[in-house]
Image (cartoon, rainbow, N blue to C red):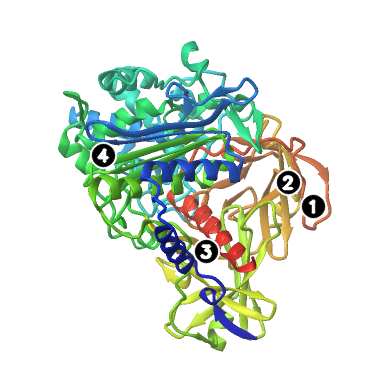
Amino acid sequence: MRTTNIKRRFSFSTLLVGLTAILFVAGCVPQSWDKQLANHLVDTMGQNDIQGLSIVIVDKDEVLYTQDFGYADTANNVPVSKDTVFRIGSISKLFAATAIMQLVEDGLIDLDQPLVSYLPDYSVKTRPGINATYADITIRHMLTHRSGIPGDFVANSLDHNPQVSAFTALLADEYLAQTPGSFHAYSNTAFISLAYVIETVSGMPWQSYIQTQILDPLGMTSTSPDQQLPPAMAALLAKDYWNGVEFNQDDHVRVDTVFTAGAMASTTTDMAMFAQMVLNHGDLNGNAILQSATLDTMLTQQYPNNELDNKYGLIQGLGWWLFTNYPGGQVAAHGGDLQGHHSILFISPNQELAVFIVSNSYESMLHTQLLADRALRLAMDEYRGIAYSLLLALIPDTTPPPGTVVPWSEAELTSHAGTYTLPGMPIEVERIDDTLSMNLQIDPSVPSLTLQLVKMSDGAVRTALDLFGTLFVLPGMEITFEVIDGYDLLTLGQDHGWIKVASLLEKYEPVAIPQAWLDRVGLYTDPDSEAYPNWGLSYEGDMLMLQLFALGQEAKYVLIPYDDDRAYIHGVGRGTGETVWVDNQGKLRYLGRSLEKQVPTPLLAVASQTSGDETMNPTNIGSDSASLMFRLTMARLKEVIDAVRN
């Protein structure tokens, strides 16, 4: 089989240089930066069935660019406008973090004091393998997703408009997922718990605190912390779309139980004010809500020596993600995903520029971050004179990997082959003769793709695609096999320009499965869930797996039993370490869900079941940097592969 690299088949950079030369020779005037941005936004929306989108770019004193595209309500031809209200999802966490830091300034909270110092009635159980208890969780752990508190606990059993204390009380039956402080694992539940801290310490409901201490001083009159929006704002709330079809968000997610993790709503106009507050070091128009030193602390990496986090590429401040690859200096960011509403906030403190983008279509989830990246780069070039080849930086990297392909050793072939787990998606690294390959699901709408893993002469491991007998080494993605802190890991690394990260997959070593768990294999249902009713427990090969069936797809979570009634999800990072346990009625309990067994099935893999509602949209109130980067990795890889195939 011949081996080549991707640049021999196509070169975007050569094409762009040639086109640019032709345009100038022909006397064409290049587009202004704002028209270039607008055209790119419109093209992206059209190519991805995105119904509505709004963007604003600001410096510390004024709005530099703002534009609205598409529709907030397609059925009634209501366009997106500056008054359109969007759910901002996990960007709500920035307001929670701001509130906590205000209370730190007031001397009411110490970041390194245990959570139970402020919430004496708070508790979570400890499972085997966890070397601490809930009493070791600090506020700093919670602000940086290192608390070990399970990530996405649901509370369908609560009445609507519940108290946050009622939510946190339910955690007493749950188990820690990781040792507090050990490594980053994104937790919405931890940020919901911070709402209870705000209430207990301040003496007022968390919504009232955020309203009076943050929103009112900043003049953010079109932003609400209330999970049930005021009537005037509710009337302006953008509809949600998936595949161009409207769906009712409230039918699929309990917005009133996500609290400070993701329930807030706002407009681009108001979010511009929040961004300008950050650019002005905690002050907006003479109204200081944070001290400059406090904001500096929030934008400072908190755990620089954590090896697992560094392998992720995660640089975590207090509530903020921090990206260091921009030529203009560090960029602080946070995204928000809540049903069809997807948003991203990028802030460049050094260049005093910020971008906020929000959309009302599920399909925008993979694109808002890339769009914000382009917008910020264009603004840096236009307003700060940071010159570099913008167009070339914003297309898939076609630089061929250095070196040539070299053979794997027998020891490498033996040690690297096996199953590696990413939550919801075990990946098999298969040895075939003297080669290694793996399957990846790049797009749920197409079959999985088999990629070869090739070792390069410089020691790097790359992915390659076999097309018509020729092996094309793909650029950008780098693979490593290594042991970190006792975890045997496969990492999928990718440089996205604005951040270089890796998704970490832990190798699965077969364990004995108790007969009690094998007897439970079968189909299950969650009667309290509109969005995710169909589940399964299966035994495939040597793995016990919890399954979720939705959108015609199947997510698989590999389980490690530690007794007859409890097992935890295998892997490292978000969604791992969380316990599945059996209650006294024989139901499976998982993150607040109560799963009831349906029909008896043989001791074989449970057949995949799709949801009865094919138009349903998955709920995601997280913007975990690592899982986000995996999605972006797949999106970028798909672009490259499509280009090769075409």
Percent across and percent down for residue 129 are 47, 56
Label 4 or label 1, whichever comes before in sequence order: 4
Q: Which residue is mark 4?
A: 113
Q: Which residue is mark 3?
A: 506
Looking at the rendered image, the quarter that the C terminus falls into is: bottom right
Q: Are marks 4 and 1 in contact (CB under 8 Å)?
A: no
Nearest to viewer (mark 2 / mark 4): 2
Relative vertical location of residue 144 with respect to residue 290 in this rendering, above or below: below
Q: Are marks 3 and 4 in contact (CB under 8 Å)?
A: no
Nearest to viewer (mark 3 / mark 4): 3
Residue 514 visible at all: yes
435 vs 273, left or right, is right
Viewer-closest of 227 and 111: 227
Label 2 or label 4, whichever comes before in sequence order: 4
Mark 4–mark 1 Cα distance, whole angstroms, equals: 48 Å
Q: Amino acid under label 1?
A: Ala
Label 1 or label 3, whichever comes before in sequence order: 3
Relative vertical location of residue 236 with respect to residue 399 in this rendering, above or below: above
Element assignment for label 2: loop
Q: Are marks 1 and 3 in contact (CB under 8 Å)?
A: no
